[in-house]
Image: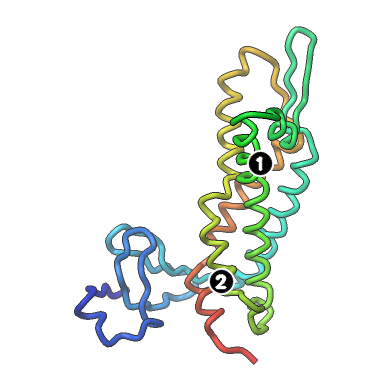
Amino acid sequence: MTHVHTGTTALGRPLEDLIACPSCDALYVARVPETGGRAVCDRCHTVLIAPKRRAGLRIIALTLAVLILVIAAVFFPFLEIHRLGLGNRASLIDTATAFSSGPMALLGLGTLAMIVVLPLIRMLLILYVLTPVVFDRAPWPQARRLFRWSQQLKPWAMAEIFAIGCAVALVKVSDLAQIGFGPAFWMFSVLVVIVLFNDNYLCTWSVWKSLETPRD
């Protein structure tokens, strides 16, 4: 990938030929690598373009899997705690609604939004954008705007962060009580792996180009 110095080499270049690094804002002339290759920022080494063969179908399949896991995890127990003959189990809904008043109520609702609602919205947006593109159809209305929203929601969709944080916290309290992992915990564990694969397959530059290409 050729580096472009803003204000000099970039002059006269059409905007569609340029790509900016999302991490350091370095500007480049976009050159698509071979399938399976990667175009990396020279300054911060962020991956800018990474086309993969049949990535669209895999992303749709993984996105559907994430949707199923997140929805199912809401209704199954997440944790079971036993101590001195007493026990309790809690689901994600129970956790979010444990505090019914005061600032903690807002915290619970915010947690539920970041680990359930926002991931669901983001996955639905990705499905909406990619489904017609993968099957060689014209993009659906507002596809570009919705894909931009899905990218803006990415830092706030924290289902996998929640699962990792819970695992770390439970290790620290395991000496105080007997901890049992419910089905929802394992669903979130699988979710972490699927999200990593999904983000690896998703090349945002390729999606933008697909949305800009006219189709019959």
Whole-percent x and y of residue 96?
69, 35
Whole-percent x and y of residue 135?
69, 79
Task: Kindly indicate the quadrant of the structure image that contains residue 42.
Answer: bottom left
Q: Residue at x 67, y 46 (%)?
A: 116
Q: Residues within 10 Å of mark 2 (few under 14, many from 20)?
A: few
Q: Residue at x 41, y 66 (%)?
A: 48
Residue 15 horizontal side relative to residue 78, left or right: left
**Disc 2 from disc 1: Cα separation:** 25 Å
- Residue furthest left as drawn: 8
Task: Kindly indicate the quadrant of the structure image that contains residue 101.
Answer: top right
Taking 137 as reference, is 99 above or below it?
above
**Dividing the image into 4 quarters, which one contains the C terminus?**
bottom right
Taking 162 as reference, is 168 above or below it?
above
Q: Which residue is mark 1?
A: 112
- Residue furthest top as drawn: 84
Amino acid type assigned to the residue bearing label 2 in the image: Arg
Task: Kindly indicate the quadrant of the structure image that contains residue 197.
Answer: bottom right
Q: Residue at x 62, y 18 (%)?
A: 174
Q: Determine the secondary structure under disc 1.
A: helix
Amino acid type assigned to the residue bearing label 1 in the image: Leu
| Of the image marks 2 and 1, the number of the one nearer the N terminus | 1
Residue 199 horizontal side relative to residue 25, left or right: right
- Residue furthest bottom as drawn: 216
Taking 19 as reference, is 96 above or below it?
above
- Judge by depth and name the residue closer to the eye, 147 or 169: 147
On residue 145, the disc is 2
Residue 158 horizontal side relative to residue 27, left or right: right
